[in-house]
Amino acid sequence: MKSIKKNIVKSFIIGKNIDFFKKELKDKIKYKITNNLKNSMKAIFTDLKKNNIINATILLSPASASYDQYKNFVERGDAFKKISKYYANKYL
């Protein structure tokens, strides 16, 4: 975490392991609990627009299994693509 922390602006936490990640990220990286991927993407694009950022990299980096929200990684990836395109068209 120490070596990459400087490259991370904010982490958006979703899923059943929220408490674990809150504990791990506390005082290390700014984070926001958004509960699901759609809310995370909405918050990300809201932050981008609010801060007038037009060129950013959004990295979907699952740190644990997401079986509580998706059947598999393919379904999760398809949802991410669909949601990110929607919010990119809406906010950018």
Image (tube, rainbow, N blue to C red):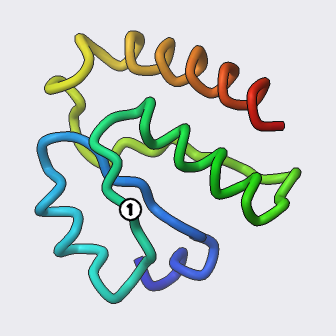
The residue shown at (84%, 60%) is 52
Which residue lies under the disc numbered 1? 32
**Residue 27, image quadrant:** bottom left
In the image: residue 48, left or right of residue 9: right
Q: For the N terminus, which image quadrant?
A: bottom left
Q: Between residues 68 and 38, which one lies in front from this camera angle?
A: 38
The residue shown at (54%, 75%) is 4
Q: Between residues 11 and 53, which one lies in front from this camera angle?
A: 53
Residue at the extreme bottom: 27
Q: Reply above or below: 19 against 4.
A: above
The residue shown at (60%, 81%) is 6
**Residue 61, image quadrant:** top left
Q: Position of residue 5 (x, y in %)?
A: 51, 78
Q: Reply above or below: 28 against 64.
A: below
Q: Position of residue 11 (x, y in %)?
A: 45, 61
Identity of the amino acid at label 1?
Lys
In the image: residue 42, left or right of residue 28: right
The residue shown at (12%, 61%) is 19
Q: For the C terminus, which image quadrant?
A: top right
In the image: residue 54, left or right of residue 3: right
Number of numbered callouts drawn: 1
SS at mark 1 in the image: strand
Near mark 1 (Cα within 10 A), the count class, few <14, some 14-19 or many ≥20, is some
Q: Position of residue 40 (x, y in %)?
A: 46, 43
